[in-house]
Amino acid sequence: MTLWTVTANHLSDGSVAYLRADRAWTQDLQHAWVGATEADAAPLLAWARGQEHLICDPYLLEVSRDAGRVVPLSARERIRAEGPEATLARLGYERRPELQRKVG
Amino acid sequence: MYQYDAFDQRLVEERAAQFRDQVVRRIDGRLTEDEFKPLRLQNGLYMQLHAYMLRIAIPYGLLSSTQMRALAEITREYDKGYAHWTTRQNLQLNWPRLEDVPKILEALAKVQMHAIQTSGNCIRNITSDPYAGVAADEVADPRPYCELLRQWSTFHPEFAFLPRKFKFAVTGGAEDRAAIAVHDIGIRVVRNDAGELGFSFLVGGGQGRTPLIAPVIREFVPELDLVSYAEAVLRTYNRLGRRDNKYKARIKILVKQEGPEAFARQVDEEHARIKDGPLKLTREDVDAFRRFFRPPIYEVLPDDEPALAGALLGKQRGFSRWFAQNVVEHRQPGYAIVNLSCKSKDLPPGDVTADQMDAVADLADRYSFGGVVVTHRQNLVFTDVRKRDLPALYAELLEHGFATPNFGKLTDIICCPGLDYCALANARSISVAAELTARFDELSQVYDVGDLHLNISGCINACGHHHVGHIGILGIDKNGVEHYQLMLGGSSGTDASLGRVLGRALTHDEVAPAVERVVLAYLSLRATDEEPFLETYRRLGPMPFKEAVYEPHHA
Ligand code: SF4
């Protein structure tokens, strides 16, 4: 079943932003507010458009739930949620965007 | 190379200061995102999937070791320690923070660099032959002309808002190493029957949604008319190009619709009006620009270097392979052109770490008069290496990951950032390149696969030049799922051609095995061990390859 959430990119560093239920922004999709219909999400998108001091270009995102996890429907949004798989790991960075600092 | 004068320097410094102020105003809310976006794009700052991306211009791909060190430092300080050479001979940073970008622009300005006109509907970075100035087949060094065009096009007030972006490529060689036929304007330096220098103008080529090979609209433009003729082309396009539909706005569509002859006539009319005006070059202008690109002071050396012959005859198989593959004849006896491969198993194609950049700068100082060129195939070139130094240079390149002996070969893959980074992408390209590299690494050790260009783009915009790959791969989206089209028979060389789609699109897991089947089919079909892939394909057409990909059990 298609569910809805609100996403954008942070103004400060362009990192992925998802809207939480308490109207804060998170880089972790699992912490995002998820609504059952597009109509539920629309007012949150309208609110997000007023958040330009923190984020850029918000839009509605289609997701589903799989074994309790929120999963984006498109390849593009899966990669947005998880970070690039390519160079980072090989250079010793963890993949998840919120953890993109050097490890080890 | 060209050195900024006080005017150039002030220009880039003022631009950096201006952007610093714009960023402050965006962060404190005085500018909305809609207001800020065109301003950041004018400074090469994009928003990608996970972060901002800054595209830094490298005019005609040429860098000094000082500039390379500055890029390394910026990459280390303001990014995550790696960056990406693009097919337009630029460098992209993948992770700059907004507040750091003005600092980056200031650091670039200190070494005569910038990110101006690396985005937007304006004249973009002018690209050229990576062997410019040293190629044996060169009519004249194209770089003075590139620099003239760069200065003419930088902040040209009339061409800041063209119908669409606009790309120039200039070559001076008989062989096309700059893909001029797939640019908005491709310029070839030529001599007429009287022996005078001039330019053949190809206009209206391009890749993307509507790939087209550029027709020649004027066989010979006299040398001193270079800028005025370019202006006449741009004016004609600016006046007649479509602005209502961005998919029909490139000059190639205009040239196709008008027909090359009719388009050329209109350009000629415009040119007649302006050619003797202020844009007319003087001999002194051209000479002044030429002086910036004078050859270095070469040593007088024998061409058959005994140390080199010894190394090639000896048991150093690695060196011999690298020499055969990556080293090219220089026109100066005793010197060679060395291609540094940025395609290895360790990093995505065209990616480079800050430490590698520092190493390249150091090697350039010690082995190649302090210069290095970024190529449209996403590799680097040292243009002036003494042949006697090749064994020592090879050992150092090996240590720093630049000695894969694959130049122009199967694993020298052109690859755009694709869906790992790019906001416009439909599909990943880096992971496909990685899988192909893994598969072909061994294969190319067993067989001499010869020249085979494999080009991958993550979407129709064709930054990975898939249309002109001998084998091209294009990422497409089918209901949110990554798919790929295979195209065969493209070429960006002197015999430029566009690849043709082979058959139905393939999934991410299918694409690498399918390409492998194409290559294996070629190995069994080639007339001789020397027949390159493109010739086999042109001789036999797509059918045997189609069968190999889609009906492997029958083939
Ligand atoms: S070809 Fe498409 S996916 Fe690749 S870099 Fe260009 S715009 Fe992005």
Image (spheres, grey):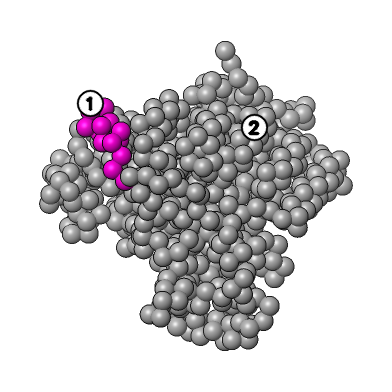
Q: Is A77 displayed left or right of B39 in the figure?
A: left
Q: Residue at x 21, y 32 (%)?
A: B313
Instruction: Give the camera-side residue of A40 and B504.
Output: B504
Residue furthest top in the image? A104
**Picture coordinates of residue A39 (x, y %)?**
68, 42
Query: Which subunit holds the residue at mark 1?
Result: B
- Return the disc, 1 or 2, that comes first in the chain's sequence: 2
- Does the numbered disc 2 mark a residue whose Cβ is under 8 Å from ligand 1? no
**Picture coordinates of residue B17 (x, y %)?**
81, 47
Q: Is residue B180 visible?
A: no
Query: Which subunit holds the residue at mark 2?
Result: B
Foreground mark, 1 or 2, reads 1
Q: Amino acid at mark 1?
A: Lys
Q: Residue at x 45, y 34 (%)?
A: B348
Name the image quarter holding the C terminus of chain B: top left
Q: Amino acid at mark 2?
A: Glu
**Picture coordinates of residue B294 (x, y %)?**
53, 56
Q: Is B277 displayed left or right of B207 in the figure?
A: right
Q: Is B103 displayed left or right of B238 in the figure?
A: right
Q: Quick one: label 1, few (<14), some, or many (20+) residues within 10 Å?
A: few
Instruction: Give the camera-side residue of B363 and A96.
Output: B363
Q: Which residue in the protein does label 1 denote? A: B315
State the image quarter where residue B448 is shown. top left
What's the distance in space between the residues labelled 1 and 2, CA to CA?
Answer: 39 Å
Residue furthest front in the image? B300
- Does the numbered disc 1 mark a residue whose Cβ is under 8 Å from ligand 1? no
- SS at mark 2? helix
Q: Which residue in the protein does label 2 denote? A: B73
Q: Residue at x 76, y 55 (%)?
A: B6
Residue B544's place in the image compared with B76, above or below, is below
**Picture coordinates of residue B51 (x, y %)?**
64, 37
Q: Which residues are magenta?
A: B303-317
